Image (cartoon, rainbow, N blue to C red):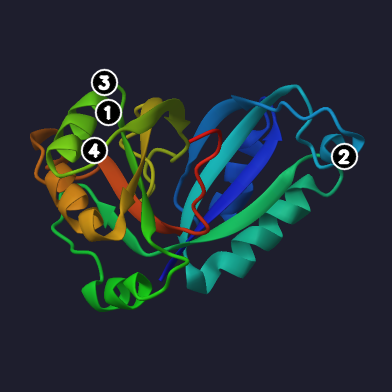
Amino acid sequence: MFKLIVSIVPNNSGSLVSSAANDAGASGGTIIPGRGTASSDILSILGLGDSSKEIVYIVVDEKIENDVRAAIESACSKKKHFGVMFTVDVNSFIKSGTKSNLNLEEKSVRQNSNENNFQMINIIVNKGYAEDAMAAARKAGAGGGTVVLGRGTAKEGDEKFFGVEIVPEKEMLVILVEQSKAEAVVEAVQNLECFSECGSGVVFCADAKRFTLLGKR
């Protein structure tokens, strides 16, 4: 089982988080620029006010999750109102250049729950390949997705686990699909030529709980 550790911190602070995580056993991550939009005092205290942010995604084996989180907390402990961190269960983690399948037994159990009818599929590739991944996903039944730019954090010589060959610019494609289509979408992305080389990308999936459509229908 893998865990996705997400940290939201001020601009230019993502490297502090990823370095602490690497020292605790993580092997790289992805830093995505963002912007907070909250105006309330409470959200500002949480570090989510209206200012530039960096979102750090780090996938780790659950065995080292506590160590990595503790290292990040320690690294940020002297920073006032620095940000937030949370963890998401990752149901399937697939590295490029390998042929892996979603856990069908586990997926079947999740499908029986009314709370988990959708999967969030996260595809991280070198810049320029997100559109190829989206095209393949659409052919497999996905309706659409969101592409955000990021950069890798793995150090030269690290075992490539979440980063890719020290190519600084990344694209992350986030797709929300019904459980029944998730396996086909992942398989379609795995079969892309740009995903056949080791170190060219990763795919991981997580339950999207309490999915709600907002706005007038």
Q: CB of mark 3 within 8 Å of CB of mark 1?
A: yes
Q: Position of residue 55 (x, y in %)?
A: 59, 36
Is 91 placed left or right of 208 in the picture? left
Q: CB of mark 4 within 8 Å of CB of mark 3?
A: no
Label 3, residues with CA under 10 Å away: few <14, some 14-19, many ≥20: few
**Foreground mark, 3 or 1?**
1
Give how far apart the Cα atoms at labels 1 and 2 are. 35 Å
Give how far apart the Cα atoms at labels 4 and 1 are. 12 Å
Q: Which of marks 1 and 2 is nearer the N terminus?
A: 2
Residue denoted by label 4 = 200
Q: Where is residue 119 in the image (x, y as percent from the top left)?
A: 36, 55
Residue denoted by label 3 = 128
Amino acid of disc 2? Ile
**Foreground mark, 2 or 4?**
2
**Foreground mark, 4 or 3?**
3
Residue denoted by label 2 = 45
Q: Which of marks 2 and 4 is nearer the N terminus?
A: 2
Give how far apart the Cα atoms at labels 4 and 3 are. 12 Å
Q: Could you tell me which secondary element the residue under label 3 belongs to?
A: loop
Residue denoted by label 1 = 130
Q: Which residue is drawn at 54% across and 33% down?
A: 216
Q: Which residue is drawn at 58% across and 43% down?
A: 18
Amino acid of disc 3? Gly
Give how far apart the Cα atoms at labels 2 and 4 are. 38 Å
Q: Could you tell me which secondary element the residue under label 2 belongs to?
A: helix
